[in-house]
Amino acid sequence: MKIDILTIFPKMFEGPLTCSLLAKAADKKILNISCTDIRSFTKDKHNKVDDRPFGGGPGMVMKPEPVYEALKSAGVKKRNNLYKNPFKKPLVIYMSPQGKTLKTGIVKKLAKYEHLVLLCGHYEGIDERIIEWVDEEISIGDYVLTGGEIPAMVLIDSVARMLPGVVQDKLSVQQDSFYNGFLDYPHYTRPAEFKKMKVPEVLLSGNHSDIEKWRKEQALERTKKRRPDLLK
Ligand code: 9D3
């Protein structure tokens, strides 16, 4: 999968993309991520990427021209391009507090595309006319951040681990909570006793069907208590 990130803060991505699973996925050629500075597409002498909002009010708005040029440079043509295979079209995602909340269903859908273009807004957001080129508007939840960069990293991380070969253990992806609709069961490792606290007997029993049953009960119990909304 190719991912183009369009941002005015490309440096924010240096850490996450060069560490962890994402770096390994890049080494294995499963992921090809590039980060483009929207400011490099400005043509005025002050390299202005933002301006005051028409109609007044607080904050600044990202100017449309450099964002448009950045989209073009990532291979975005026009809206509703007719592709034989829709997953081959570059899918343009605008990270925005007004978007749909990122959930496992969206992550699975995004993982099918060959090319994602992530547009990160800053300030109050981008000029609304750019929405013409946007396929999806996505938020990561109901809290206020300073821009779309960290949400873009969250999205990339969640999509990357769905790609075959990124997470070694296939079962680990499929059994994940949210994937199967329940919270995870509790985990224990050695020692069997720690500060007088014992590991539940059943886990030491070697009886796999009992263990499976216990884990299912625990997952259900936790979900009921902590996230009853997931059971609906
Ligand atoms: C404080 C400014 N707000 C209006 C009074 C609007 C606002 C604009 C821009 C709030 C946050 C942002 C920056 N956030 C994002 O670009 C963003 C975001 C988020 O803040 N939370 C969750 N998901 C996302 S995706 C992009």
Image (cartoon, grey):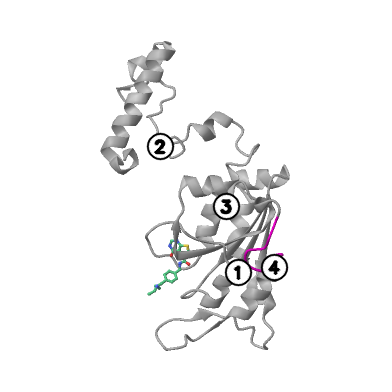
Give the alpha-carbon distance from disc 2 to disc 4, as whole Å. Answer: 37 Å
Residue 1 % position (x, y) = 68, 49
What residue is disc 3 on?
156
Residue segment shown in magenta: 73-83
Secondary structure at badge 4 equals loop
Q: Residue at x 26, y 37 (%)?
A: 225
The dot on residue 181 is: 2
- Of 53 and 16, nearer the camera is 53
Secondary structure at badge 3 equals helix
What residue is disc 4 on?
77
Place residue 141 in its image quadrant.
bottom left
Q: Earlier in the sequence, mark 4 or mark 1?
A: 4
Secondary structure predominantly adopted by residues drawn in magenta: loop
Give the alpha-carbon distance from disc 4 to disc 1, as whole Å. Answer: 8 Å
Secondary structure at badge 1 equals helix
Q: Amino acid at mark 3?
A: Ile
